[in-house]
Each structure stands twice: as structure tokens, then as C-alpha cells.
Image (spheres, coloured by chain):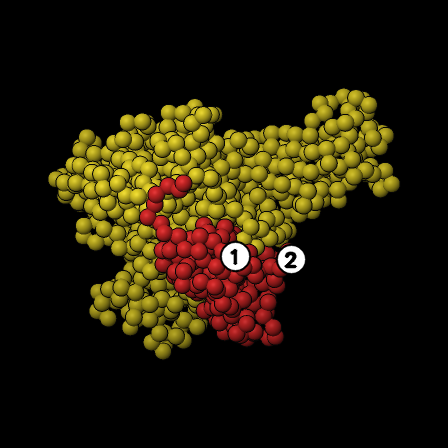
Chain colours: A yellow, B red
Amino acid sequence: MTSTLPRRSVGQRVKRHDGDAHLTGQAVYTGDVTVPGTTHAALVRSPHAHATIESIDTTAALAHPGVLAVVTGAEIAAVTDEIPHGLDAGHLGGHHAVVRPLAVGKVVHVGEPVAAVVALTPADAAAAALLVEVGYDLLPVVLDPDAALAEDAPLLYPEWGDNVIIAREVGPDDFDEVATSAAHVLDGELRGHRGNAAPMETRTYLADWDSRRRHLTVWATTQNPHVMRTVLASTLRLPEGSIRVIALKIGGSFGLKMYGNREDFIAPVLSRLVGRPVKWVEERSAALLPAARDQRLAYRVAFDDDGRLRALDVHAVSDHGAGAATHGWGMAHVGALATGLGYALDHCHVRYTVVATNKAPWVGTKPFGKESATLLLERIMDRIAVTTGLDPAEVRRRNFLAPDAFPHTHTSGLELDSGDYAAALDLTLELLDHPAARAMQSAARAEGRCVGIGLGFELMPESADIPGALVAAFDTSTVRMSPSGQVTVLTGVTSPGTGNDTAIAQLVADELGVAMSEITVVQGDTDLCPYGFGNISSRSIITGGNAAVLAARDLVATLHTTARAMLSAGPEEAIVLGDGMAQVAGDPERALPVPAVAGAVHTLSYLLGLDIEPRLESTRTYRPANVRQVPDELGRMNTYTTYPYAVHASLLEVDPETGSVTLLRHVVTHDCGTVVNPMFVDGQVTGGVAMGIGAALGEELVFDADGVPASTGFKTYLLPRAIDLPRVELGHLCTPAPGTPLGAKGVGEAGFSGALAAVVNAVNDAIAPLGAALEATPVSPPRVLAALLEAGQ
Amino acid sequence: MSDPTTTSTVDLTLTVNGERRTAAVDGRALLLDALRDGFGVTGPKSGCRTGDCGACTVRVEGLIAKSCLRLAVAEQGAQVQTLEGLATDGALTPLQSAFWENNAFQCGYCLSGMLFAAEDLLERVPSPTEGQIREAISGNLCRCTGYDAIVDAIASCAGGERPNDRPGGAPA
């Protein structure tokens, strides 16, 4: 029997349990850890985008004071195996890229590491790295994905025979059959741009190889400590059990710190080679190398006079950059799966081609390719509105799946569980005061000002489970109560700053009826926590949270049985836990403090004649049901378990003289099912909106003609600052995830996609009276001006 | 016996969070690195080392400063206050409490910059507008929150009435 007391903290704006540690500078991040005898690594990076490595002369570097070792890629390759792939394109009809910690034989992008220096101080390591002389033989560079697909293109990996990492199709290829009966067919191209996760903390590692124990301890900025250990063991040729990975507080991640990046291996490999602790801190310029979202989407869409979609055909060409062992290319696949999701669209075909170019590779980045699908559909909705003369909101309303349409299998195979998209649209328009906003726009236009309103509907498949990959929709938590009633939760999910540890403590506190202050949550340590997949795919509460709830209920059963014996409660009497007490329901006089019951479980089990295992510890795994990996007759699977969504509206003004965009308002209605902590959900959504607006307005990785990045810091890669952003106005709906204990859906990627789409749509709405359109991102001043010039303005 | 390096250390004396201390630091070290490595004060974080993100913010002689833009030896004898020195005897400042109540941070990496910039603003402008608050923290980057919660936390510590000078500002 479980607690019958009402939930106390779920749904409440509970503060971060570790807030004071953060606010007083006591929270420990990886870079704050010191180990006696620590040495420091620096990398020698390629200045060329494409070249063979002819020679590496380490003599001068080795002679530099304080230098312990200079190691080349070939030397590391001799003692390691290649990095296992998170999602191997080679297993799915594409090409397998061999990736090692440092480059071997050739470099394929600027910044690729070719050698490493270990020295006693960071300054000496950096100085010596400059003394390593690498002889390069330059090769032709290919930076444009279309050029890379040409017959005579230079090849990054000649053994492949082309530059295609993978090319696949999603959905039935039936556009032409359907389009003949549609009233309208439009075609177009949408060009995305190269963005970066840009957490405030760059990747940082401290690896300590103990040669006597043959044991490696690695403090790492990783979202996935257990999986990192699995792949480290493979690459370093060590048993998994002789490695401990510890993820402490993380200064943001947004995908950058997913496992499989070669950066994860540098300090561990070097520590093993030199036999000393090695620290390596990524430079900001290097942290701005990994990329995402650089896609060109060519499309054809068929629709009727009433604005209803009939068919969509898309070819996405992704500028992936160099081959990688991460899941990065999977963003093109997920973008294809998510295309058209949430709309009534029976004919949707997406072909995607992921192309290798001489840039640093894609790495999984929030919101993992789904933003491209959102932007595409939302541009299409607005184009349909223009063609049909309907209001953009009405076009969306007519195309949304109805609330009674669930479960709904999309053409890609994803199975939507629940939602009320039209209600979210209505609430957003109400919060915006849509008629007033349109009136304001008309008045502004009469004055010659360019004011625009844009909508963006995002639907995020979350909580992924990829068959054969270490990306799972389930996770594991342990709950343990000590004789003094102290509760420890150990979980396989991690928090890169989101606060899910606090939310998990809330869930456990409610189940056990104890105060939050009695609960400690331990995450990120492979020696302490159950094996888990860490922080991926917005699933920490769904998986780690639900698992902790199940485990806590096991403890509740033990506490009930024990309290029943201690309180001489009859079989007809119920025991309830709450306010730190175990009491006979309806009889407050017969009550005991929970610690007294916990103590009795540990010390009085024989005396009390308990006919149970006297155990106040349980490990449980929660695996959501809504996954289908046996392909259906069309070969489709459902690899995502929850489907949160949002509708955004952006109101902004474009200055036609400068091309600059000023956001006036941004409204978003969000639905992630049951909310455990509204304050944290608001924080996730608002942060996501800010990131989406940043991507829309200006964040862009740019390169010169030789492939040298020009975006090397925060003066050249422009993150949004407080003055760049409007206040995000939030509305909430709650459609609980059906068939789940909590009803919660993922929220970690919320806000980004719809904000990106709403801003791009609003800019187009603003400049439409000038005859201009902009089908490329970012909508930065140069691009806006170019669009206006093209329109003759 | 020490290992040979190119480092020539300098004895740097600072009053760090009220305590006069001396540490041997690399003569080339930035104030940020001297505090973290020499004095073991890790509240200031390294985010960009170019003065753009503000995660390394401290007070030097009472004025807020990005410690990645200062040479440590140039601050010989200075009073330095870091994130660790804001709360006294375990009691959070009103701004720290407001940041906690408003969930004005997620990963926490930007807190040195945000808290010092906020404190500096309220000392100069006790009742700032939302626009003034946003301006004051715009030397600092936060990638997690979208800033609204930070703005709210700072506003809650302001004295008196606060005119709304921003479109889309919080409804009353």
C-alpha cells in the first residue's frame, strides 16, 4: 500500500536544494578540483582545414622547461582503439568514420588536434605547444555541402568514394500522386546556419591514472558519466571496472558535453601515458568549433484552398563537417522524423543527405535537429496563409491534430500520445492580445515602420530510445533510508544545471512523507550511482524521477509494515506517512517519527516479528511504455516516448535602414504535462526561448574561404544579452502524459524551436509590405538588408 | 627540490574576503588564475578569458572588475572580494536570497558576474527600471535562464516604486 497523503511539494515552486552552495561560491565544478601533482595539457591544433600531416618535430617542445611529454596522434593511436560511435552511420547504410583522440595522418578541419603537450604548468604547456613543428601538405578544401556532393569534389575520406556520411529517407515517397489533386503546390528552399551550444563552462577534465592499482579516475564535464566510462574503457583498452568517472557541478551543456567527443579522451590518455594527473581545459575558441543546425531544406508542399496540408516533400542537405563518433548526424534523422509532426499530414516524405565538409563536426545540440523541422513547417504555414489569404493562426488551427486524435502515428512512425495544440494557440493569441497587436502593427505600418507578428508551433519528441545505442528512454534510481531516517537518492540521470536533482528530491519527499532537508541526491559518480544514461533527450524527471518514485514506494511498504507492528495497528487500519511521521490514519495519537521507524527496521526486525526483508533500500528502473522498436509494415518505429509542445508569438520591429531587429514581445504557451516544479519549467522554457532568439537573430559560426573559423569568442559569436531580449511571457497548459505514473513530459529542449520560427516569421511579416522575404537564418542585419536590397528597397 | 619550469613566482599579498593573505603566483598570471590557483578561491569562474562573459567578476578595492582582464601582480596589496565573500557568517545577502527565491540561476556558472553587477547597480541606482537592470547585467552572459528570473530577482531587491519602461514588462 502506498501513501494516501496528498502530495506536498510536487507542483510547488520549491527552491533549488543546493542554491546556497551555488550562491556562495561553494559549489564544486570540475575546474575547481585539485589533485596533488597535477600536470597540465595543451593541444597543438591544425591551422589548416585539409592537409596531410607529413612530419611532427617535437624536439624544441620537449626541451622547453617543465615539459613532461609531447605526444602525437600516431603515438596515441598505437596504444588506444578508435572511439566507439554513439550512433554509427556505417551500420545504417552510411560511412563509418574512424575517429581517434588526436588526428592521425591527415587533418580535416581547422582546430583539429594533432599533438598534445603535458607540462607542469598551463603556461608551459601552452608555450611548448607553440614549439611543436608540424609539416603539412595542403589539400583542396571543401566547405560548401553542395560543392562537396559534386562529382569531382575533394574527398575528406578517399576510402569512402564520396563525401556522404549518410543519406536516408523517412516516410512514403508519394508527393507527386497526391499533389495532382491539390489546389496549390509551392516550392522553396530554407537555409539554416551553423550554431553552437556555447555553455558558459567549456569542457574540462582532470584524469588521474594510478599505475599501482591500474585504476583511472576522471573528473569530467560530461552529461553521461556512465556511458563515458563505457567508451573510455573501450578506447583505452581497460576493463570498465577500473575506471571511475565523476561529473560534479556542470556549467551548462546543451548537448556539447554528450559522450563520444574526442575531447573526452585527451586527459585520460595523457594521464595514462605520463603516469601523473593531467588536467585539460578547453579554450573558448575550441569550444566554438563543434556545430549544429547547418541545413538546407528544399521542399515542395501541396495544399488546398482551405489551407489544409495535403503533402510535403523535403530534401535536407546537412553541412555536418568532418566525421565524428558522436550522435551529431542523428540530428538530421530526428529532424526528418519530426517534420510535420502535430499537423494532420498524411503524406510527408523527407530525404536527408548528411555531407562531410572541412569544418569541425556536428555534435548533438539542443534541440537536436527538431528546430529545423519546426522552422520549415512554420514557414510553410505562413506561406500557405499568404497564398490563401487566410490568417496565419487560422491556417495552423485548421491543420492541427485535434485533441481526440491521439494516439496518432505520424508518417515518420512517431506516435503522439496527447496534446491540445489549438488550445495552446488560442491562449498564446489571448496573451498577446492578437487583435490589439494587429492594430498596433497597422498603425505602425501607416507610419512607414516595419512591425511584424510571427507564430511558431513546436512539438518536441523527447525521451529517446535508440535501439543498439547507449541512448535509452529508461533509467535507474536507488533510494536508501539510514537508521536515523536520512534519505539518499542515487540516480543514473545527471543535472548539467537544470535542477532535476531538486525535483527528484521533491518526488521522493512526497512519497516518504519527509522534509526535503532529509534528502540527499547523488548524481554523476560511476562508483556510487546505478548505471544510467545521464542527461539526454529531456528525460531526467520521466526516467530518474519515476524510478525514484518506484523505489521510494518500496521503502514506504517497509515503513508501513514496521510502523504497523510498532503502533499495534490492526489489519483494517491504514498507516500514512507525512510531516516526518508515520501514523495510524485518523488517529494522530498513534504516531511515530519516521526516523524511529527507520531505526526499528535496522535494529528491531526480529523483535517486531517482521515477516519482510528488513530493507530500506531499493533500486528501480522506470521504462516508459510508449516506445515501439519492432518496425511496422512500412519499416517505421516509435523511438520517442513523450511529446511536449508550445505555441509562440513574436512581435518585433525591423529597422529598414540598418536591418536590425528589435523584439517587442514574445509570448509562449507551453505544455509539458504534469509539472513537478513550475519555477524550473519556467526557467527551462525561458532559457530555451532566449537561445532560440539568439539563433534567429545573430549567433552564427562563420568561416573564411580557407575554412578558418572567424567565430572564435564571444565578440564574434554573439550570444543574446539581457538587453537584446524581451521579457518572455508564459502561458501553461497541462495535458498529462497518458499511462505514466507522473504524467510529466520532457521540458529540457522547450522554447528554442518555436522562438526561432516565430522570430523568422515575424521578420518576414515585417518586411513583406516592402516586397521582401527572407528564407535564411540568422535574420541578422546584413541578411535583412540584403533581402531588402533584393526587393529593390 | 622543485621541477624546472619557466614560471617565476611572485609573492602576491591580497586581502581576500577580509583576510590578508600572501601566495606565490606566476608573475604572468591573470588575477582570475591567481585567485583560483594561488589563493584557492574558486568562486570566480573562467568562461571566456576575454572579458565578454563576466563569470570571473570580483570586486577590487570596492569596484567590480572582470578578473580575467587584470594582471595579478598589478593588484599587489589590494582588497579583493569574491563570490565567497558576499555572505557574512553564513547569512545570504538580500540579493543572494532573491536569486534563490526566483530561480535566477541554473548551472550557476555566471553567478559571480550577475550578483556583483546587481549589487553595483543597486548601490548606484536604488530603484532601477527594468531597462536599467537589463543594461547593468548586459556585461555578463547567462546561457541558461534567458535573464528574466535574474531581472526579477534584482527588481525584488530594489527600493520604492519601479516604473515599467520595457514593452512586454511584467504585468502588475
Q: In x, y percent, where is residue B26?
A: 39, 53
- What residue sits 27% from the left and 62% below the top? A783
Q: Nearer the viewer, residue A57 or A593?
A: A57
Q: Upstream in the sequence, badge 1 or badge 2? A: 1
Number of the label disc, if any, that sits on residue B89? 2
- What residue sits 47% from the left and 40% below the top? A35
Q: Is residue B8 left or right of residue A622?
A: left
Tag 1 and tag 2 share a subunit: yes
Q: In x, y percent, where is residue A342?
A: 44, 46
Disc 2 sits on a residue from what chain?
A: B
Q: In x, y percent, where is residue A618?
A: 63, 29
Number of on-image labels = 2
**Image position of A781 with respect to A510: above or below:** below
Residue type at mark 1: give it: Arg
Packing grade of label 2 (10 A; few <14, some 14-19, many >=20) is: few
Which residue ends up furthest to the front in the rendered image? B1
Q: Nearer the viewer, residue A759 or A527?
A: A527
Answer whether residue A706 is visible to the viewer in this image. yes
Q: Is residue A566 left or right of residue A155?
A: right
Disc nearest the viewer among 1 and 2: 1
Residue type at mark 2: give it: Asp
Cα–Cα span, label 1 and label 2: 19 Å
Q: Nearer the viewer, residue B90 or B29?
A: B29
Which residue ends up furthest to the bottom in the rendered image? A447
Q: Quadrant of the C terminus of chain A?
A: bottom left
Q: Is residue A429 left or right of residue A283?
A: right
Number of the label disc, if any, that sits on residue B21? 1
Disc 1 sits on a residue from what chain?
A: B
Answer whether residue A257 is visible to the viewer in this image. no
- What residue sits 44% from the left and 42% below the top? A221
